[in-house]
Amino acid sequence: MSIQLVTRNIESTLVETLSDTPVTVLQGARQVGKSTLSSMISKNISSRSVTFDSNLTLQTARENPIEFASQYPEGLLIIDEVQKCPEILPAIKYVVDSDRRPGKFLITGSANILSLRGSNESLAGRAETIILEPFSIGELNGIKEDFPLMLTEGNILSNLQCATPLSRSEYSSLIVKGGYPDAQKRVGKRLDAFFDNYLTRVLDHDANELSGLAHIDRLHTVFKLLAANPSQVYVNANFAREVGIPESSMRGYIKLLDDLCLIKTLPSWGKNISKRAVARPKVIVSDTGIVSTLNGYSKDFLANIENGNVLGPIFEAFILNELLKQHTWSMASFTPYHYRDKDGKEVDMVLELRGGKIIAIEIKAASSFTKKDFSCMQMLRDMLGNNFICGVLLYTGSEVLPVGDRLFCAPASAIWQFT
């Protein structure tokens, strides 16, 4: 399948937002396909596209932002790479306040527009933000996968038994490739070259445009350390000590990497349930292809059973990222968290649905498991009672089994095999 023809699972949400909201913000990392998706959307509506990658366009917008924002009143104005010109945001607000017609603007950004230097404008009440992630495994296979919805509907065990397991080598191949569109066309050294050049552009060029950090060169060191353990409970003081950066400065680097969409932060859950819950976020590097290149991991290296201790963290990051991608389009309304208590007991992901119902997900890179792997999910089940829907251990094995009351194990590939 041609990469350009991959249907993005967030497309229908984008169309709906344009139909009822004046400003739609399409936000995501550089080169995840924002411009391609915007172009596909624009074919069916009256629109005009401009990009701030053009110096002339950028200069024109800075010199007269209101006139620039008013240039296409009869249709949709698509503005690409808006983070380069924060001056345009107040002008967009002015134009929208004069005419609140839905679908006036579609603006794309490779960074969080709420963090742009030079602008305090959030477009509150006028805009809705849609996150575009790298390709999900379902998107690459023409599936709009929805694992969270599946766990809330029908017979969970029966649904899970429909999953087709993958081998350790097949998981490793998916991990090393990651989800960036251009990465799908490459292998070996060419794949590494893509990620090396990508990171140089983002960490050196884009980060300078977005941030006022005094020692921006340290950003490489911070990101490499995060990539060494791409799914970890983040302790600011410990990490600052390891990197050699003052604790007071460390949060600025983490926020910048988040704004650049290179990492995600998964908040902690459970303070209202247990006094022993730890209120620390989990930091996840957003693409395991990048992680693999930075650490020198090949598919064969990760597939080697002797490297199980290496596969564990990156496998967890891979599965968490796939679930977080589904969060942007899932028909199940939920908020993702992680759980960890002061005794070190943890659940890799906790999905809190409306009404307080809970789904617990544990991730294990091994092809087997023990009862101990379910102990924390069992604890949450006993603590929550009827509010606990189920707990699922996702692993590299092939069997689907009930392991206890509302507790199951299933191949990790199950998460992208249900529509």
Image: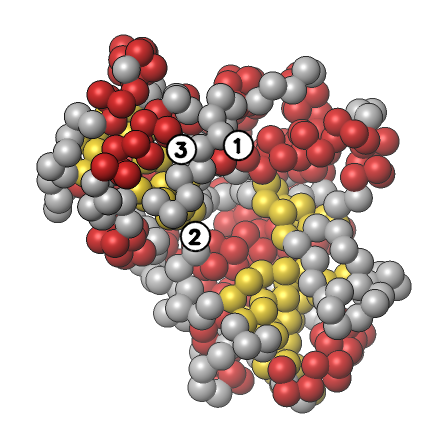
Query: Which image quadrant is residue 235 in?
Result: top right
**SS assignment at label 2:** loop
Return the disc, 3 or 1, that comes first in the chain's sequence: 3
Name the quarter where the C terminus is drawn: bottom left
- The answer to whether residue 296 of the structure is visible from this angle is no
Which is closer to the viewer, label 1 or label 2? 1
Q: Disc 3 vs disc 2: Cβ atoms closer than 8 Å?
A: no
- Identify the residue position indicated by label 1 in the image: 115
Residue type beneath disc 3: Gly
Percent x, y for residue 303?
62, 51
Q: Nearer the viewer, residue 212 or 124?
A: 124
Residue type beneath disc 1: Ser
Distance (Cα) linking label 1 and label 2? 26 Å
Query: Which image quadrant is residue 75 in?
Result: top left
Which is closer to the viewer, label 3 or label 1? 1
Q: How many C-alpha atoms fall within 10 Å of the one at disc 2: few (<14), some, or many (≥20)?
A: many
In-image side of 29 versus 43 (left or right): right
- Identify the residue position indicated by label 3 in the image: 109
